[in-house]
Amino acid sequence: MRNPAAFLLTLAICGATAAHAQAGDPPEVAYPHIVEHAATPEAFVPTGWRLEHVARGHLDNDAREDALLVLRMDVPGNIIDNDGFGPDRFDTNPRMLVAVVADTDGGWRRVMADHALVPRPDAPVMDDFLGDDPASAVTIRPNRTWSLQLHSWASAGTWSTREVTYTFRLEGDCMRLVGYDNEHLHRGSGETTTTSVNYLTGRAWSQTGSIEDDAPGPQRATRLASRARICIGNIGDGLAFEPDLVAAAAAAAD
């Protein structure tokens, strides 16, 4: 009988090769400057882009409602042919996140513009990183923080799937990272790993388990190696970022 482990490894290697051999590299794009002030949140959308979603809520400390915009480039040339796995036409148009706050004069002021945290689509086998639902992936919470959930799932090339959630809080000119949660599943083995980081306290924990077992393993305490403030511009690709963690006992001894 064929060795199951070897068979699964062969499938993974073949899938990775097929995924790599699909559509070519996405066309280069130039990200536009986002104006600092505008009369409405919609007026911050630059030419050649469209508004996918507006989340409403409070980002600063006044009583006026603010907004978080999810923008998507709308250039037909960024939709490319694909002769491998995935759709025949692959949309590589990137996204931007823009946060604007309401001013006392009735206008709006930009406090953040970021085009790195939501990765640009570059592999046709990958699901949409916002799960095809920006309204659920990007939300403003009642406590004046906002969250972004990134979805990573591939139909070929990898067994791994992840749900990564970032939580931010506006502090002056810094959109500060205050929380990070990563739920990882290996679809081949069924093993799960959960990591949660509180960037305000410096505390973190991780936990392993399995989809075949309702009772996860014990939480293992860790800590951030540094308490330095991280702004959204320091993160880059939200699926490539990893917190710098050390064992809790080692951190306490420092």
Image: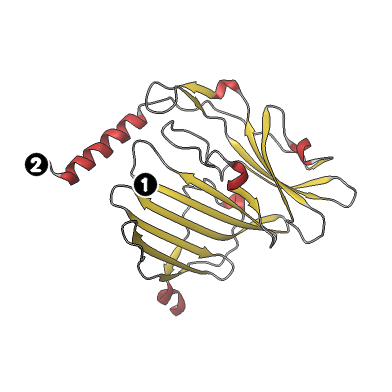
Q: Residue furthest right?
A: 105
Q: Residue at x 85, y 45 (%)?
A: 107
Q: Which residue is identified by label 2?
A: 1
> SS of the residue at dot 2?
loop
Q: Position of residue 160 (x, y in %)?
A: 36, 47
Q: Residue at x 46, y 27 (%)?
A: 25
15 w.r.t. 209: above or below: above
Q: Which residue is identified by label 1?
A: 160
Q: Horizontally, is 122 left or right of 188 in the view?
A: right
For this rendering, which residue is in front, 36 or 183? 183
Select label 2 or label 1 by which is in front.
2
22 w.r.t. 119: above or below: above
Q: What is the distance, in whole Å, between disc 2 and disc 1 at their CAs? A: 27 Å
For this rendering, which residue is in front, 86 or 47? 86
Disc 2 crowd, CA 10 A, few/some/many (<14, 14-19, 20+): few
Quadrant in the picture for residue 3: top left
For this rendering, which residue is in front, 221 or 51? 51
> SS of the residue at dot 1?
strand
Q: Position of residue 232 (x, y in %)?
A: 61, 52
Which three-letter amino acid code belongs to the residue tagged 2? Met
